[in-house]
Image: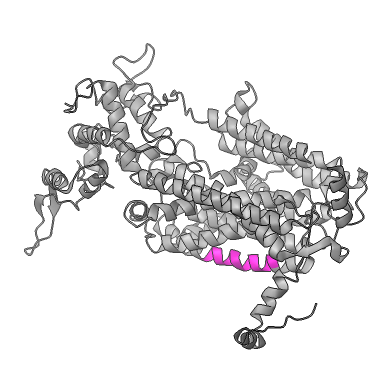
Amino acid sequence: MSAPVWNNAVVKWVDDRLPVFSMLHHSAYEYPTPKNLSYMWNFGSLAGFVLVTMILSGIFLAMNYTPHADMAFWSVERIMRDVNYGWLIRYIHVNGASMFFICVYIHIFRGLYYGSYKAPREMLWWIGILILLAMMATAFMGYVLPWGQMSFWGATVITNLFSAFPIIGDPLVTWLWGGFAVDNPTLNRFFSLHYLMPFVILGLVVLHVWALHTVRSNNPTGVEIKSPQDAIAFHPYYTIKDLFGMGVFLIFFLFFVFFAPDFFGEPDNYIPANPLVTPPHIVPEWYFLPFYAILRSIDFTVFGVPAKLLGVLAMFASIIILFVIPWLDTSKVRSSKYRPVYKWFFLVLFIDCFVLGYCGKKAPDDYFMGIEGLKVITVGQLATLYYFAHFLVVMPLVGKLERPKPLPASISQSVLKEGANA
Amino acid sequence: MRKFALTAIAAAFALTAFNGGAAKASGDAPVPAAQDWSWHGLFGTYDRAQLQRGFQIYKNVCSGCHSLRFIAFRNLEGIGFNEDQIKAIAAEYDIEDGPNEEGDMFTRPGIASDYFPSPFANDKAAAASNGGAIPPDLSLMAKARMHGPDYITALMTGYEEEAPEGFDLADGKHYNHYFPGHQISMAPPLYDEAVEYTDGTPMTLEQHAHDVAAFLNWTAQPELEARKALGIKVLLFLIVLTAMLYAVKRKIWRDIEH
């Protein structure tokens, strides 16, 4: 790949000193992308778009928000009522959080299905998990800022989890709070960190894209690019495809912003925080529900380790385990498209995550989907068991025992074959 | 692959949908009946006359105990009052202001930029006058309760003079079908002809409840009309833009086997 020749004198002058144009040219025109990517490959760029949307809307919200326990709730209502288009900015930000998680969860499931975590993409996958963790921290702290009932009690419940750790637990919680309860210092530091974290995420995204451009995109066949016929330039093919996807996504996103802005929210958060009144049901935002279900499903002690600590460890482990799946997966084949057995286990895992989400939403003693005698806690425990078994047992075993379908010789060949079948 | 994806999505939706449907009946309180509201739907708007009737109820009945802290008199423009009417309404209220040059607080008639004054000086005073219960602020009530305005209507009309047999009603409490736990401190606030309408609307309990719930939906979401009007334009624009992007995408990819 030869360096591009710049005809415009200004462009050339700049490029000789700081090769921004060469870099753009390199990563857009010269960057080879598999030509068979499906629409499932749109969600990475969509997540990046939502990140930028969140940062911009967040900056404007911060101009009008007051991080003080006595004024935060009031200042949010001022944004909704008196700031020009404040309601629009806030509803974009509030729904944007949900949209971010929708994109990222689809992105992760796509990676799991097509084996995008397997060599040589382990680092790419790891950075992705770090982004997820950073997003969760950011979303949690952001939810505290309006200082409503669910903000306050959510913060109390979640920060209290750290007290489960022996010896350091209680001092750690006091340190996190900046006092002996969730109060003004907590709100202040959460605001500061909530403003910081998106830029940490942005930095991680740069690393994520860097790693991506080194190992290149996986694709639905899981077969690497072998010859120039397998690939096309990112621009214009995937820029236009991403733009079209963005249009569809924006219709979805903005429908909620304009017509159902409180769809993802809890009514209780429109009640100002009151440390003396505990809401009857404290539930986290929907994107935390599966993890909340895992946390709550451990209601027993093992070898004298208290249930609360086990629950906290299980919750963290549910994400940490993703770091090692490149080695837990023993299959030689990447894409589940050619894995007749594993593909069904993947489907079970996918549904399992929704079951966990459902269990996280309900009170533990409720009946699962109204089925008499079947407690939510029991189903949550089974779903948690499967979640871990999927990675620790199914992945290594099925990879060894399953006989995968024959892989196409190349991306081009698979494209031609599918074309012939259609 | 397609069939596989459909199975996955169908299963996911079944769980989510079930969750949405059944989760909300908190405790033993029934789900309030869904009312027909003027602002429902993509093109829904507020009914100004109804909002003004609802305001009349708030002013004559609710405001005795409930504050409306997030609403200023100037906001009443949103329910169809003109500047002079707003000034007149504001002037009916005594607002504490100050300190003056001598350092004393004083009371003056309200002006458009003042917020609705609270009926009690503080929560302690509110609790002392209401048997220990603090009447909540109403500004956001329609967003702060599941089923919002439907719940408010149901609560206003859901009182029972006698608690059902076997129900242990505490002293000073009232039985209400829709209040969580059924024991509410608020006495039935509305009844037939509680407020005198001047526009010929029937003055029934149901109508009063409906109107005040509509007013409180406005206090909670005053931006609703602007939001929906802008939303229609934005979505129409996006649909056209996306269709064009799709056409461009087809054209660019025309010669690529994929």
Q: Is residue A145 magenta?
A: no
Please determine whether, in this image, residue B38 is positioned above or below residue A330.
above
Q: How many callouts does the rendering have? A: 0
Please determine whether, in this image, residue B183 is positioned above or below residue A87.
above
> Where are the magenta residues, as a range?
A196-209
Q: Of B122 and A229, which appears nearest the observer?
A: A229
Q: Of A217 and A384, which appears nearest the observer?
A: A217
**Where residue A398 appears, x then y in whole percent?**
87, 44
The C terminus of chain B sits in image quarter: bottom right
Q: Is residue B229 left or right of residue A93?
A: left
Extreme residue toward the top, this view: B165
Looking at the image, which residue is at 67% across and 84% down? Answer: A7
Please determine whether, in this image, residue A386 is positioned above or below residue B242.
above
**Where residue A201 appears, x then y in whole percent?**
60, 64
Residue A132 visible here: no
**Where residue A149 appears, x then y in whole percent?**
42, 45
Looking at the image, which residue is at 38% across and 16% down? Answer: B167
Q: Is residue A8 left or right of residue A66?
A: right
The N terminus of chain B sits in image quarter: top right
In which quarter of the view is residue A130 placed?
bottom right
**Where residue B78 appears, x then y in whole percent?**
27, 45
Q: Of B91 and B244, which appears nearest the observer?
A: B244
Dominant secondary structure (helix, strand or loop) of the stretch shown in magenta: helix
Q: Is residue A199 magenta?
A: yes
